[in-house]
Amino acid sequence: MLIINRMEEDLKDKAKNYYMIACIAEKLGMCSESASNFFKALFAADDSIIAKIGERPKDHTERFRILKLKFPELYVITDKLFSTYRRTYTQELKKEELELVKRRIKDAFKNTNIKIPTDEEIKEKLTELVKKGKILG
């Protein structure tokens, strides 16, 4: 049980980190990079709730199967966004589409009990990384 809890928490942390990177990229006007990280945040959130039942999907197909069976609300969110995710491989998202993706990711976070990072938390994290010389240094 402890291993499952640790895996779930690690995935929640990963989801929050991807979310923060997506928000930073969004502020820089980098829509593709922002979208890519919002989707990574979504999949990490999905996997965090799947980890709760002791499973670990190996690919999107398995993730969708588990979500559909065990977490239908999250399945609907992920399924509706998946065609947009695939389109990001070849096309740039419009700013309005990115906003829609971001709202849906927030819904997924609420469904998986992941606290959505605030702008202040994102700013603090960025400042901390710059001070440590991990960014721009």
Image (cartoon, rainbow, N blue to C red):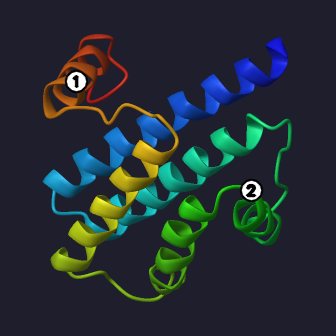
Q: Residue at x 26, y 53 (%)?
A: 25
Q: Residue 136: x percent and y percent?
A: 26, 30
Q: Residue at x 17, y 77 (%)?
A: 96
Q: Residue 86: x percent and y percent?
A: 54, 82
- When the figure is inspected, residue 35 is found, relative to residue 87, above or below; the finding is above
Mark 1 element type? helix
Question: Identity of the amino acid at label 2?
Answer: Lys
Q: Nearer the viewer, residue 120 or 66?
A: 66
* Quarter-of-image position of residue 24: top left
Q: Quadrant of the N terminus?
A: top right
Q: Check disc 2: other Cα within 10 Å, few if <14, some if 14-19, many if 20+.
A: some
> Cα distance, mark 2 to mark 1?
32 Å
Among the two numbered marks 2 and 1 on one chain, the one whose residue lies closer to the N terminus: 2
Q: Nearer the viewer, residue 19 or 65?
A: 65
Mark 2 element type? helix
Q: Is residue 47 left or right of residue 87?
A: right
Q: Quadrant of the C terminus?
A: top left
Q: Check disc 1: other Cα within 10 Å, few if <14, some if 14-19, many if 20+.
A: few
- When the figure is inspected, residue 8 is found, relative to residue 55, above or below; the finding is above
The disc label shown at residue 107, or none: none
Q: Which residue is mark 1?
A: 121
- When the figure is inspected, residue 60 is found, relative to residue 119, above or below; the finding is below
Q: Which residue is mark 2?
A: 70
Q: Residue at x 63, y 64 (%)?
A: 72
Cβ atoms at labels 2 and 1 below 8 Å apart? no
* Quarter-of-image position of residue 97: bottom left
- When the figure is inspected, residue 112 is found, relative to residue 115, above or below; the finding is below
Q: So how many labels did they put on this image?
A: 2
Question: Identity of the amino acid at label 1?
Answer: Glu
Q: Residue 95: x percent and y percent?
A: 17, 75
